[in-house]
Amino acid sequence: TDIAGLDAHLIDCRACPRLVEWRETVAREKRASFRDETYWGRPVPGFGPADASLLIVGLAPAAHGANRTGRMFTGDRSGDFLYAALHAVGLASQPTATRIGDGLELFGVRITSPVHCAPPANKPTPQERDNCRHWLDAELRILQPGLRSVIVLGGFGWQSLLPVLDDAGWAVPRPRPKFGHGAHVELAGAERPLHLFGCYHVSQQNTFTGRLTPAMLESVLSDAARVAGL
Ligand code: SF4
């Protein structure tokens, strides 16, 4: 299957009862405050081209960001921070992301997450992560031929992604490398290595407190883009 086919299947997934209930309840209750828009309230697919050489892996859609707009990191403060940085280093066509159809394009970059539905308190359960894993597996296999680097935003994404990379054929060292901001691990692959970068998540807890600054994020993006040939 191709990436469009994968995304089309994904948006109909109902494998996690708690998340289906949550995403739909939020959409129903909040639709009133965003009257002019349809509220997505479904699984959010990855965003960006299938021939991306750089993949960014987050955690899960935010209740009133991606769960509202239907596009990764679109429509909230986390996304404002991420897309401004992507634009600053030349990886996005514009610094803002407001809704599907706003003209935003990513250049050689795709953004996805190990859990595709908004979880209560931004905390998916291990079972929900495991349910969603086959989507990430399939997405990575489609991206694999061109993929050169991955930036993981936060420890949850890091823990979720390593086993998937391992299964897809990259050599993940044992013991597994630890997540940290600035972590950079080169994984040997059958054809070429994959560069894995750790970065603090772009959540407001990190960006409002200055734990993650625009310069820090832009620096990781630039490093990952360089090794990805972007
Ligand atoms: Fe399906 Fe993933 Fe959403 Fe669970 S989190 S319902 S597996 S798309």
Image (tube, grey):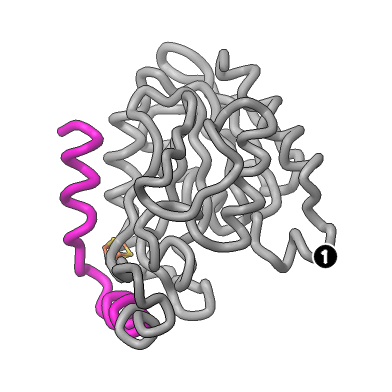
In what quadrant does ligand 1 lie?
bottom left
* 94 left or right of 70 in image: right
15 magenta-colored? yes
Query: Vertically, is 163 above or below 12?
Result: above
> Magenta residues?
1-26
- Residue 196 in percent (x, y) is at 60, 33
Residue 207 sits above or below residue 195 on the image: below
Question: Which residue appears at 61% of the width and 23% of the height?
Answer: 225
Question: Which quadrant of the figure has residue 5?
Answer: top left
Q: Which quadrant would residue 95 be assigned to in this image? A: top right
Q: Position of residue 207 (x, y in %)?
A: 75, 59
Residue at numbered disc 1: 209
Residue at 58% x, 34% y is 173
Question: Which secondary structure is most common in the magenta stretch?
Answer: helix
Question: SS at mark 1?
Answer: loop
User: Does the segment drawn in magenta span residue 120?
Assistant: no
Point 30% across, 84% down: residue: 28
Pick the front one: 2 or 138:
2
The structure residue drawn at horizontal position 51% and vertical position 21%, both measured from the top left corner, is 148
Q: Is residue 175 visible?
A: no
From the viewer's perspective, is 77 left or right of 72?
right
Q: Is residue 126 above or below residue 182?
A: below
Disc 1 crowd rating (10 Å Cα; few below 14, some 14-19, many 20+) is few
Of all residues, the one furthest to the right in this rendering is 210
Dividing the image into 4 quarters, which one contains the N terminus? top left
